[in-house]
Amino acid sequence: MALYAIGDLHLGLSVNKPMDVFGPGWDNHVERLCRAFAQLDDDDVTVLCGDTSWAIDFAQSLADFRLIDSFPGKKIILKGNHDYWWNTAAKMKRFFSDNGLTTLDILHNNCHFYGDYALCGTRGWFYEEEQTGHNEKVFNREVIRLEASLKAAAGRPILAFLHYPPLYTGYRCPEIIQKLEEYGVARCCYGHLHGPTHKRAIEGKVGMVDYSLVSADYLGFVPKKILD
């Protein structure tokens, strides 16, 4: 039994979104993901840190989620900025159930438990989004969602998972970082950064939190082991 994390699978089995247009690092990325996940065991757990499918609705996403469901172990999914298929928690759970997707669950205003650890998280926030007008409301909602997830840990040691990086060379999101540190988060995994922006990622311990970039192309499409 082990805990893994990986983000930005960017699957598009039912849409015309070939990822190799973003460079040779994405060549055959679906096949590479399949080979990597095949090495996992049925009692493993993998957190998918957003941008899972290019689909815009449940119908388009079904082929992608059937593929993910076929991978060994449980998969816990959080929202990314390109997950346009995302819906209410009740509708997503019903979609999974109605289609026999038995290994999938979501991380959204809640937390999951892995051994003694609480797995918490949300989409997060990034400098690409300006904190003005409607976006300020979205930003505040993300901070509230993160805190709701962290509170659900109920005193257990916490591992946090975000889509957007809470820190980046030349950028910090102090409100997100404050919540991570306030609740004593031991480690935070994040995605979203691709290609040339990998070099601007911050990894390792900063303040009280150990940060890890888990974008699929950064990991060579192999899920990163977080815990045994």
Image (cartoon, rainbow, N blue to C red):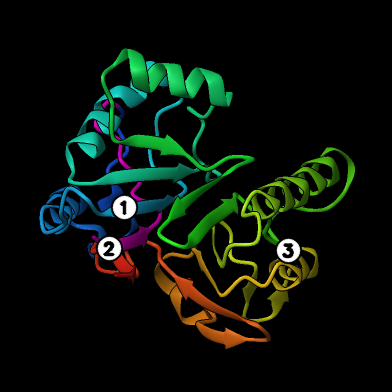
* Element class at badge 1: strand
The residue that appears at 17% across and 48% down in the rendered structure is 42
- Work out whether mark 3 precedes mark 2 in sequence or the reverse, and give the earlier one: 2
Residue 2: which disc?
2
Image quadrant where one finds the N terminus: bottom left
Residue 51: percent from left, percent from top: 45, 45
The residue that appears at 60% across and 42% down in the rendered structure is 110
Residue 81: percent from left, percent from top: 56, 44
> Mark 3, mark 2: which one is toward the viewer?
2
Distance, label 1 to label 3, CA atoms, is: 25 Å
For disc 1, the neighbor class at 10 Å (few under 14, some 14 to 19, many from 20) is many
Residue 176: which disc?
3
Tell me: residue 8, above or below residue 65: below
Q: In screen coordinates, is 164 left or right of 129?
A: left
* Element class at badge 2: loop
Image quadrant where one finds the C terminus: bottom left
Q: Are marks 2 and 1 in contact (CB under 8 Å)?
A: yes
The residue that appears at 24% across and 26% down in the rendered structure is 63
Q: Which residue is mark 1?
A: 45
Q: How many marks?
A: 3
- Which residue range is magenta in the image? 1-14
Distance, label 2 to label 1, CA atoms, is: 6 Å
For disc 3, the neighbor class at 10 Å (few under 14, some 14 to 19, many from 20) is many
- Work out whether mark 1 precedes mark 3 in sequence or the reverse, and give the earlier one: 1
> Mark 1, mark 3: which one is toward the viewer?
1
Residue 35: percent from left, percent from top: 10, 55
Of 54 and 161, which appears nearest the observer? 161
Tell me: residue 164, above or below residue 213: above
